[in-house]
Amino acid sequence: METTYTIWQYLFTLPVHEIPWWAEVFRSILRVVIGLAFGLGLVPIYVWLERRMLGWVQGRLGPNRVGPEGLLQPIADVIKLFMKEDIIPTNVDRGLFLIAPIIALAPVIMSITVIPWNGSKSWGAVAPGLDIGILFLLGVASIEVYGVILAGWSSNNKYSLLGGLRASSQVISYELGMGLAIIAVLLMCGTLGLQDVVRGYDLRQPHEFVAGTVLNNGQGLINVLPLSGTGYTFYMLDWSSGFWDWNVFRMFPFGLIACVVYMISMIAETNRAPFDLPEAETELVAGFHTEYSGFRFGAFFMSEYANMAIVSTICVTLFFGGWLAPLGILNQVPISWIQALTQTPDSWVPWWANLINSLISALWIILKLFTLISMFILVRASYPRLRYDMLMRFGWKGLLPVALINLVLIAISLAVQHSFRDSLGTAGAWWVGQIIAWALMLAAMLVAFVSVRKSYASRQRDIASGEIPADSPIVRHPVALALPALTSTEK
Amino acid sequence: MPESLAGFLSIPVLLFLIFALGAVSTAVSCVLTPNPVRSALFLVLNLFCVAILYLLLNAYFLAVVQVIVYAGAIMVLFLFVIMLLNLGSPERIPDQMKWQQPVAVGAGILLAAMLTVTIASSVPSFAPATSLPQTARRTTLDAREPGASQTMDNSAILDDIARRPETMGTPYGIGKNLYNPDKPWLFPFEMVSFLLLVAVIGSVSLAGRQTSEEKA
Amino acid sequence: MNDTLQGIWAISGPLFVAIMGMVVLVIGLGETSPAGRRFLPLGTILGLVAAGILTLVSSRGIPNMPDVTPARFFGQGMLMDDVGGWFCVTLCLAAALTAGMAPAYLEEKRINNGEFYALLLFATCGAMLMALANDLINVFVGLEILSVSLYILCGFSRRELRSEEAAVKYFLLGAFASAFFVFGSALIYGAVGIANRAISLQQENVSFTNFDIISEALQNSARSGMPLMSSPLFVTGIALIVVGLGFKASLVPFHSYAPDVYEGAPTPVTAFMSAGAKLGAFAAFLRLSHAFLASDGAEPYRLVLWTLAAATMLVGNVLAMRQTNIKRMLACSSIAHAGYLLVGILASSHGSASLYATQSVLFYLLAYTLMNLGAFAVIIWLGRNGGDYLDIRDYAGLAKKQPLAALTLTICLLSLAGIPPTAGFFGKLYLFMAAIRSGEVSIAVIGLVISAIGLFYYLNLIMQMYLREPHLEFEEPREGGAKRAAILAAILTIILGVAPNLLVSPSPAGEMNAPPPVPMLKTRPGENTLERGSLPIEPNANR
């Protein structure tokens, strides 16, 4: 049976497997354009937001002259950067010096490809439905540091080199905690595809793929609604779902712990305050980009802000329900309402319905993104920079064990759930697994508490016996007293 | 014959040729570059090329893991150490056994030639690809008929996915094959973790600080 | 799940050794008192004895399946038979003797840490896994566990430059050898996979590097007119694997590291390395040879083995004659012994004498372990105050100063030389008999001639001990565990030499359950019981 489609349907609405290659190419290009606009086009707004917000925190105005409320200030800055002379110092490693900013920016753009902005398999991301989405993100995140390292090394400047070295060791240290937090989500969701992560869709559980039915995935209700004749296969969360179904609240509190670990690591990963050691101006002039000027500096600047946005979006995707609204009712305009309104048959949906729903999804993700960006800025405004050894110690001895234990507890809980699912049902098995994991968590906390008490007592003894001088900053510092592992100085 | 040539030069083959060439040339450059940082960077490029070759074989998981582990973690550490030690190009050490160099080059070329001839002469054996099971293009769960009310058990779908050659390299395929106790790969996989433990113990005991007992 | 548990029971020996290694490691980390230190070698030896007993019990019969021997486990990747059991027990013996001779030496060098014994146990576990592996992947994992442990052990004496040099040399060359092995396995996987597809054996759950599958593919592909042995991919793969294993067994021309590494490594490590690495490598060689048994076209493989065996025996003995350092001499002699063993491996690839040759290799490996470790134990025994007597001239007149040590060393050397009534004599006898039975007369003759040359340097050392005047005092020898280990090894060497039939009597109708000439796949109840070997062969590849 030959069906003739209009070119409009080929380009926009048909499912992926029913369109010719040229339509797919067109769609890919369009998706890339949307992705770039989403990833890089918002950068000036982050810059503006940061400067205004810092001004607000510090009781000053911030840029407010160029354009309304100073909104055009970043544009003016970009123009200034492009007009500037592109200085290449004499003794640099020329090839690497030139290519380093590009290497810094490229992975950021690459990670845009997998971030979903709605649930569609043909329009949901630049590369929707990639079933190794999380791994792709981890891979790209792991090569981001090359730009910084190369910039530091090729500049032939000791401050730059120190900045590059700090960046590489810092990124490696924090990538571990970050990776483990991400793997925790992966375990909870049972999938590597980012769209599935957002939907909280668990491949390990039996599903019935019947159109129009309501499924229970153990966390929330999913309304499967494959719509014929469109490129959309909506997995619409039921109205009864909401923020309590997000991964951050999954298997409470393990999702939350993973989320906190991720958020700390993501600040370190982007070299932002209070972890901005690679470019600490009080110590290293400007760190790895000391020797850069003009648009090459601009590329580093841009990659920092874009990277901030990317890690925030990843955080939103992994933990805060991606494009989903905090209440199910705000997710989308129900298709049935539109059908009733336009009096179309059940199997047909007007194209603008999908467009509206996509825009609602995009709106939610951008709203969440800006919330996290504001958090970045407030953290920068509030916290002083860490000392370098403290930073490393915090990563290796603080975040990593917590993330690791969290991961093991999730695995234990899931294993218990899996073995009890047949006898107790999904909900019963969930409780059994969680109670066992909670008990283990409490035991781990008890062990930690006892060891902290012990080390606190030993520190007190050291102070009493004079081994630690009374004027040492440790004496006045509660954390230093309790957690020598995190704060001790080598004798 | 132009027809067979056109059949041969399909896009995957072209991509393979490009990245295989890239892999070989970066590997050669890695060995020949005297500057350690550049040498390490060539190795990174080489790892990327190999990762793309894995992609062409449908081994997505392996490709990404290659990038994460080797390009992203191990090579960053390499670079870190090279920069920390601030290594320049090495001095030429006077060669005590000059005759070894030409002999080594000759033997190396001989070995490479032998391997090339061997593998090239085995290529025709790959030809009967028709005996491979024809697999449907739609492998994702969403791609089934819209509106068709069929009940599918997830584990059945996943078992099916794990068996297909084109999806064996995906995380599902790897997981299903690697963690199956009936298959021969679970045991070596578990023993490799033991191997890593041995390596960790070794590196700590070789590189760790000397104990007070040792210093005495 | 039941299969998995049975598999764990079957290879409980190596697993127990691994667990024991971790226990010793943890105790060694926490324990600093001398009493606790003394527990480390004791615990190691007890663990090894227990593992040996476990192996013996588990190789004699698997619960619930008493009649299936040898059974395959873990997706047919591991197997437990008497050959593997023998290797495991020999390895436990080697490791236990090493642990017995080590403490005094380590104490003096101030490296008596728990890590030493843990790594020794890990290395043993790796070699045992190699011996029980039925798949090149598992052989490789075992090989790497063994090798990595040995690299570290070689450099264990961190303050000595020689030890570090030995570790670096061994590590760099060993890493290359491992790469050869992996590459060879990959080629074999491809070749066997292609062959299996060509003969329409679409099997599930198999790995194409499985020895059973390789053997089956060799047989069936020969019948289908596209013999695997003529596939260049396969031949190259085998060649690369022989390189990888040959390095571990220190065959010529992959031997050049051996004298330096053996000399530089701490003496107990040298002792273990000379036995443990060889045991693992020859176990893999033996499995590989058995895979070739059933097929006709194994001539290229045999030609390579023949050449390697002849070269190894010759070069090893000639090199040993020129050495003045006793550790280097024993290193070169161990190269030569690898050559003798390879004669047995060569013979075992002939169906006519496979069982006999396998048994003779097993016997020789046990004898070699005892006599070589005994010789090294005497070296440790005589040393003192951090120094060892390593120059051969140091041993002049030893018989007058330390008659017991001289006697023990003499027994070990006579056995290494192959003079009755010692184990070495019967070992060589069986090996060359096996070669003659299998039709490899030329290599047997060459071996006999060369081992006569080898007499020279062993007898030279014995002459030094008994006929020269002493110029050293040999005061305060270390004695202790090394003395006990040396004497035990010497006594066992004599016992095996007097009554070789006590443990094993290689005869055509041997009682041992060596693998049958044609390895058969174990078919599980309920599975397709169609015999794999009798599948109808379709010449047409496209089915």
Image (tube, helix red, strand yellow):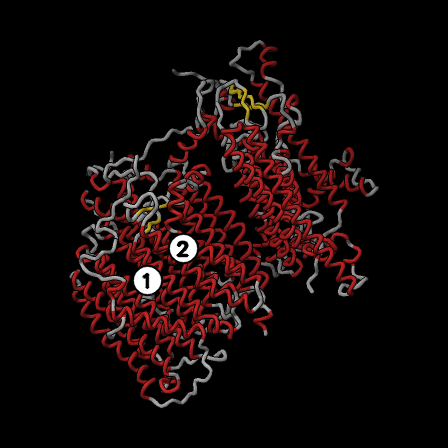
Q: Is residue C81 left or right of residue B166?
A: left
Regarding mark 2 in the picture, which secondary structure is present there? helix
Image coordinates of residue C7 in percent, x first then y, are 38, 46
Image coordinates of residue C413 in percent, x first then y, are 31, 76
Q: Which residue is pictured at 50% across the width and 51% down the height? A: B70
Q: Which mark is residue C14?
A: 2
Distance CA(mark 2)–CA(mark 1): 23 Å
Amino acid marked by disc 2: Pro
Q: Are marks 2 and 1 on the same chain?
A: yes
Q: Is residue A15 above or below residue C82?
A: above
Q: Is residue A376 above or below residue C261?
A: above
Q: Is residue B208 above or below residue A242?
A: below
Image coordinates of residue C62 in percent, x first then y, are 33, 47
Q: Which residue is pictured at 40% across the width and 44% down the height? A: C5
Label 2 crowding class (10 Å Cα cut-off): few <14, some 14-19, many 20+? many
Q: Nearer the viewer, residue A160 or C58?
A: C58
Q: Nearer the viewer, residue A355 or B180?
A: B180
Amino acid marked by disc 1: Gly
Q: For residue A89, which quarter of the picture? A: bottom right
Which one is in front in this view, the residue at disc 2 or the one at disc 1? Answer: 2
Q: How many marks?
A: 2
Q: The disc numbered 2 marks a residue on which chain?
A: C
Q: Are marks 2 and 1 in contact (CB under 8 Å)?
A: no
Q: For residue C90, which quarter of the picture? A: bottom left
Q: Residue furthest right?
A: A59
**Image quadrant where one finds the N terminus of chain B:** top left
Q: The disc numbered 1 marks a residue on which chain?
A: C
Q: Is residue A241 left or right of residue C351?
A: right
Query: Which residue is denoted by mark 1 in the rendering?
Result: C246
Of labels 2 and 1, earlier in sequence is 2
Q: For residue A480, which quarter of the picture? A: bottom right
Label 1 crowding class (10 Å Cα cut-off): few <14, some 14-19, many 20+? many
